[in-house]
Image (tube, rainbow, N blue to C red):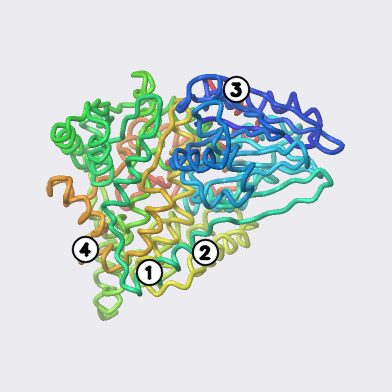
Amino acid sequence: MCGIAGTYRWADGKAVTDRLTGILAHRGPDGAGHYGHRAGDGEVHLGHRRLAIIDLSETGAQPMVSGGLALTYNGELYNAPELRAELAAAGVRFRGTSDTEVLLEAWRRWGTDCLPRLRGMFAFGVFDERTGELVLVRDQLGIKPLFLLRRGEGLVFASELKALAAVTGAPVEVDEAALVASLLYYWVPDSRCALRGAEKLPPGSWIRFRPDGRVERGRYWNLRDVAAEGRDRARAGERPDLAAVVEESARRHLLSDVPVAAFLSGGLDSSYLTALAARHRPGISAYTIGFRAEDARFEAMPDDLRYARKVAERFGVDLHEIEIAPNVLDLLPRMTYHLDEPIGDPAAINTFLICSAAREAGVKVMLSGMGADELFAGYRKHVANLLALRYQRVPRPLRRGLSAAVDRLPVAGSRRGYRSVRFAKRFLSFAGLPEETAFRRSYTMYDRDELLGLVHPDLAGTVEDVLAEHADVYQDNGLDDFVNRMCLADARMFLPGLNLAYTDRSSMAASTEVRVPYVDVEVVRAAFAVPGDRKIAGRQGKAVLKEAAASVLPREIVYRPKGLFSAPLRAWMSRDLAPLVREVVHDGELVRSGLLRREALQRMVAEDSAGRRDFSKHLWHVLTLEHWYRDATSGSGESRAA
């Protein structure tokens, strides 16, 4: 796992690439490399920061140059052994044991045709000295990031947006549409970029730059097509052996020349992976978190630690427990810097602190249960949207009465929050809406009118564009299964835009690689071959995954209530962050610039403080957005890398 960067026909390309690479040093503290060559009437420069995981010797160093090809690569190929054997049988002689060399030789032999054969997470750039062409590639599901910026016929690219912002040689312009989208979702969708002119290479795609200025794009893997294939398999009565697919993915994700550990929250997804990993790596380490007792009590958080301890004891796992009582005032700006774009999920802090503790113990690689909820309908919103269909059959007068009664209930008292009331208010906010709108409202921050009331009136058209984009993505499928339509939307938007994004940024900030065995092409294929009524059975989400896990885990782990990999936001907002919230709402840059309306923010603070509504997540995101906006518009973000 590494940081990659480069320039193509860009003025002062060597110096720019060296600076890009330097900004990415936290992604790869084990080594740095540079490559340069003529490219038509200009030059190409490739930079690399190395986090050595496989083949720790110099034969794994990058950029890797061989036989007229140069590669800078960020990722891991879990089927590298099979590809290596196939290439060796065809006469390829390997110098080392790295998957980087396997990728380079696969590209030499098959070009873009090698891409559908790759099983892993990756973003890379490969330059052909013979043709002068540079090709950039991103993995099938968007696990690894790749940002690029084009000016004229020049290109600059990097693993992180902050690197591009620091070297473009012109004032940074914020893309206001991306900020509106981030307010809606609390992250920036993968289709948008927070800085104007920059873009994210879409998952499952490549882009080729030629020395004559021509640019060609291609897609080698499409999640919509995979979901359609899964639908056809399900109709034909095919039932994938999910337990075997998940175990095989877990085993492959252990491929490493350095120690591998696991996240272990005590929930189903991480417990299942940890148990499977322990089969193949006895005594594997795992890391879990807890919060200050008063914070967890105020937030009404479940006691996940005792479940994590039970799993560790049963499977001989070396468990490390980390109590999180962070100085959030210090961590907030640091995390905002590393997250690259405004992401308002405090789980990023958990990931960063866990990875930091693991790294201090000498662990470079962690396994995460990320992705299981999206693919197997494990979130409360999935069950809630199904329940909403039944709720809509309740007579309208009864619905109005219930809504009025719940609306009067407080979401928190002076010493604790009322989680069930928060859930009820959330459910009633979308339960009567049409399918796509209800699904959007079940997980986004605001409805249309609330968002219009929060932003500057000139951004009204942008609000409509962002809402239309959600509808377009949600409806862009031929699935006749409501549950799988939700899963597909999550896998296309929620997973790459939020969960994979913060996981990559937070872990790499701690110079640690996080692997996600559920977000594997074979697991995804199997997931979409499972009908929705096997994913949600009654009110039980992830039913089919629970069936698979029940052969390994005790039932009290498999069928326990769902936990949350989150943070005690209400406690933080009412204590640690209350002064900062007041400052940002009354005199923050977002308010002074006119992007956000002070009166709307003040209403949120007042209702949250009075316990009438829970706006803790909304206000946390406003804080992250404020810090990000200050850095982006002042140009000072680069200085906070330490």
Sooner in the amino-acid sequence: mark 2 or mark 4: 2
Q: Nearer the viewer, mark 2 or mark 1?
A: 1
Would residue 286 appear left or right of 196 to someone viewing this image? Answer: left
Q: Nearer the viewer, mark 1 or mark 4?
A: 1
Q: Position of residue 589 (x, y in %)?
A: 59, 38
Q: Nearer the viewer, mark 3 or mark 4?
A: 4
Residue at the spot of label 4: 539
Q: Are marks 3 and 4 in contact (CB under 8 Å)?
A: no
Identify the residue shown where x is 54% and y is 59%.
452
Would residue 430 appear left or right of 582 to someone viewing this image? Answer: left
Q: Is residue 587 visible?
A: no
Q: Nearer the viewer, mark 3 or mark 1?
A: 1
Q: Nearer the viewer, mark 2 or mark 3?
A: 2
485 or 612, which is in the foreground?
Answer: 485
Mark linked to residue 233: 1
Would residue 458 appear left or right of 133 to someone viewing this image? Answer: left
Instruction: Specify the amino acid type for callout 1.
Output: Arg
Give the quadrant of residue 484: bottom left
| Marks 2/4: CA–CA distance | 26 Å
Residues packed near mark 3 inside 10 Å, few (<14), some (14 to 19) or many (20 plus): few
Residue at the spot of label 2: 473
Q: Position of residue 27 (x, y in %)?
A: 52, 27
Residue at the spot of label 3: 639
Identify the residue shown where x is 33% and y is 42%.
250
Q: Are marks 2 and 1 in contact (CB under 8 Å)?
A: no
